[in-house]
Image: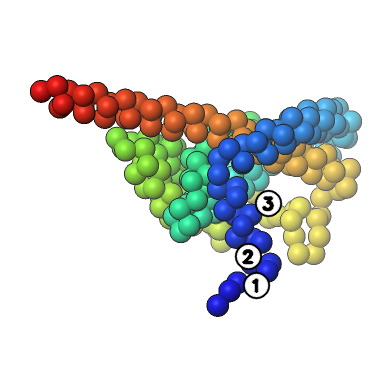
Amino acid sequence: MPLPQDERTTVQMFTRFAQPARFFALADRIAPWLWGLVILGLAVGLPWALIFVQPDYQQGDTVRIMYVHVPAAWMAMFVYASMAIASFVALVWRHPLAEIAAVASAPIGAAFTFCALVTGSLWGKPMWGTYWEWDGRMTSVLILFFIYLAHIALSQAFEDPAQGRRIANIFALVGVLILPIIKFSVEWWNTLHQSASVFRMDGPTIEPSMLWPLLIMGLTFQVLYFALLIVRMHSEMAAVRLRSSRLALMRREQTSEAVAS
């Protein structure tokens, strides 16, 4: 039974951009625009957040850490969710670029998670009197950071790079269970963190003058992820090609030695 026209179009697009040459041709055209948006977002968001937003009536100027900490925390989860989706696509449909995207995303996600942990600790000291508290949210984000590191290690732990990427993809799907734990930790356990104030069913509860620069910074961090992902995917593809060339050269040398003997 033939597929409907819209499904055939989707499959054709999916297959077309499985080809690295076509994907990177498109990505390279998009990349300058992404970096331009990152620069624009930082040029608008950072001065707005760090200079023009009024100090909080309780937290004073320390609230400005929020404009880096919260977007970094959002991206720690977003990147992992993206990595898990890419891993699923790679395992089910053997999409080569999805596998590369999953591996390339891990260091970026680890960097965002580390940024969230560090800025959270700096924010926590004046607010809570301590740099670290083993509450549900902080502990689960720390576990997410370790999951990122484990994914990076697994992808490089095998002599066969393809096997390493496949094992890392399976691990990414198992590790996705940490995301709902992070999300709902403030509701399930006693925690120093407040409940969600931006993404709520009844709308944001944060003051609009603080919300807009926060959203700009969040969007900027998201665009930064996609820009960095293109760079990382180029690097991963170059490494794959280099390993393939070395293996091919080794096989030719072994064949030549066998013939000579």
At a point 64% along the width and 54% down the height, the residue shown is 13
Residue at mark 3 to residue at mark 1: CA–CA distance: 48 Å
Picture quadrant of residue 219: top right
For label 3, the crowd category at 10 Å Cα-Cα, with few meaning under 14, some 14 to 19 and many 20 or more, is few
Mark 2 or mark 3: name the one nearer the start of the chain. 2
Q: For the residues carrying marks 3 and 1, which lies nearer the camera in this image? A: 1
Residue 105: % across, % down? 54, 40
Can residue 97 be seen here? The reply is: yes
Q: Amino acid at mark 2?
A: Arg
Circles 1 and 2: CB atoms closer than 8 Å: yes
For label 2, the crowd category at 10 Å Cα-Cα, with few meaning under 14, some 14 to 19 and many 20 or more, is few
User: Up-down: is 242 above or below 72?
Assistant: above
For the C terminus, give its image quadrant.
top left
Residue at mark 2 to residue at mark 3: CA–CA distance: 46 Å
For label 1, the crowd category at 10 Å Cα-Cα, with few meaning under 14, some 14 to 19 and many 20 or more, is few
Q: Amino acid at mark 1?
A: Pro
Mark 3 or mark 1: name the one nearer the start of the chain. 1
Residue 43: % across, % down? 83, 27
The figure's colour scheme reads rainbow
User: Up-down: is 200 above or below 122?
Assistant: below
At a point 34% along the width and 44% down the height, the residue shown is 163
Circles 2 and 3: CB atoms closer than 8 Å: no
The numbered dot on residue 4 is: 1
Look at mark 3 in the image and give the residue it sits on.
194
The numbered dot on residue 222 is: none
Look at mark 2 in the image and give the residue it sits on.
8
